[in-house]
Image (cartoon, grey):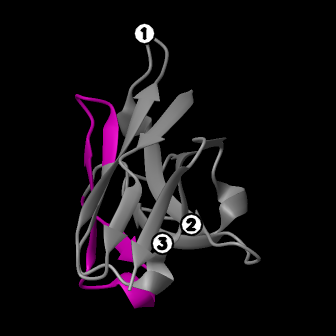
Amino acid sequence: VQLQASGGGLVQAGDSLRLSCAASIGAFSALSTYAMGWFRQAPGKEREFVAGISRSGSNTVYEDSVKGRFTISRDNAEKTSYLKMNSLKPEDSAVYYCAADRTFSSVGVQRRIGEYDYWGQGTQVTVSS
């Protein structure tokens, strides 16, 4: 599985961005076998969980600071996960990574980095004040 994150950029506080994570997987595999997550890492800080979505899309989990502002979604047919970010703040500035967790659970969402099997290369989000 290869993940390609895109959609980052330089924006002003209060603006919106939508990140995309396109998955390249085998012809006999489906994105629906993976829960998807978004993480971020700011300079000098550890990578942290931002949002996750279950295989079916029925369950979503958010880090407290982004609740109500960020929305994670997925399109299994397009093999893509999205992170819509509204009301961006300077403290949201970071490199954002998408990740895939191969899981048997259709509703489970993991917050821990070690639970994810595949990672994208990251996309930079910079929010100016």
Q: What is the secondary structure assignment of the residue under circle 2? A: strand
Check contact, mark 3 vs mark 2: CB within 8 A. Answer: yes
Residue occupying the point 41% across, 74% down? 127
Instruction: Report whether 80 appears left or right of 77.
Output: right
* Residue 112 found in image quarter: bottom right
As measured in the structure, the alpha-carbon distance from the residue carrying label 3 to the one carrying label 2 is 7 Å
Tell me, for residue 40, which label it has, or none.
2
The residue lying toward the viewer, choosing from 73 and 97, is 97
The residue lying toward the viewer, choosing from 124 and 63, is 124
Q: Which residue is the site of mark 3?
A: 50
Amino acid type for the residue under numbered disc 1: Ala
The residue stretch that appears in magenta: 58-81
From the viewer's perspective, is the residue at label 1 or at label 2 nearer? 2
Tell me, for residue 27, which label it has, or none.
1
| Residue 7 percent location from the top left of the image | 35, 47
As measured in the structure, the alpha-carbon distance from the residue carrying label 3 to the one carrying label 1 is 29 Å
Q: What is the secondary structure assignment of the residue under circle 1? A: loop
Tell me, for residue 17, which label it has, or none.
none
